[in-house]
Image: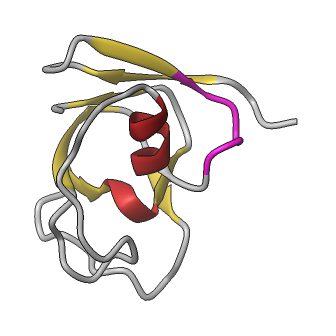
């Protein structure tokens, strides 16, 4: 079983629990009824890029575009390694 981690979507005022049942952070957000911008769902288009306020993530694929800023992530292809706070 995956460790349960808190994921806070700060601007939306929504907090969820990551338990490994979703493939990525975008799917977790959608399960919490958040409507977010996305397009490719594969880490190429950068439509889902957002600012990470706190925490660490890892990408599910090594071929993902890596945003230049260290606090920017792509939620369509990332999973949390620690509790997260996102500027969404």
Left of 80 or right of it: where is 32?
Answer: left
Residue at the (40%, 49%) spot, across then down: 26
Give the residues in magenta: 17-22
Residue 8: where, in percent of width, then height?
Answer: 35, 20
Which residue sits furthest right? 1
Query: In this view of the protein, which residue sits in the foreground, 49 or 55?
Result: 49
Q: In this picture, is 45 found above or below 28?
A: below
Q: How many marks?
A: 0
Left of 34 or right of it: where is 25?
Answer: right
Quadrant for residue 5, please give it.
top right
Q: Magenta stretch: dominant SS?
A: loop
Q: In this picture, is 67 found above or below 30?
A: below
Residue at the (55%, 68%) spot, across then down: 60
Residue 84 lies within the magenta run: no
Residue at the (43%, 88%) spot, across then down: 63
Q: In this picture, is 27 found above or below 39?
A: above
Looking at the rendering, in which quadrant would you find the N terminus? Answer: top right
Left of 81 or right of it: where is 14?
Answer: left
Q: In this picture, is 34 found above or below 51?
A: above
Query: In this view of the protein, which residue sits in the foreground, 14 or 4?
Result: 14
Which residue sits furthest bottom? 63
Residue 21 lies within the magenta run: yes
Residue at the (49%, 83%) spot, across then down: 62
Residue 28: where, in percent of width, then height?
Answer: 49, 38
Quadrant for residue 56, please give it.
top left
Looking at the rendering, in which quadrant would you find the C terminus? Answer: top left
Residue 21: where, in percent of width, then height?
Answer: 71, 41
Left of 32 or right of it: where is 81?
Answer: right
- What is the image's colouring? secondary structure
Residue 34: where, in percent of width, then height?
Answer: 30, 31
């Amino acid at each position: 079983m995956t460790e349960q981690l808190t994921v806070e979507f700060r601007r939306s005022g929504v907090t969820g629990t990551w338990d490994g049942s979703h493939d990525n952070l975008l799917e977790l957000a959608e399960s919490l009824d958040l409507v977010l911008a996305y397009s490719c769902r594969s880490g190429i288009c950068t439509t889902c890029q957002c600012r990470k306020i706190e925490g660490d993530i890892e990408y599910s694929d090594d071929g993902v575009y890596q945003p230049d800023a260290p606090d920017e992530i792509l939620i369509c292809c990332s999973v949390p390694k620690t509790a997260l706070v996102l500027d969404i």
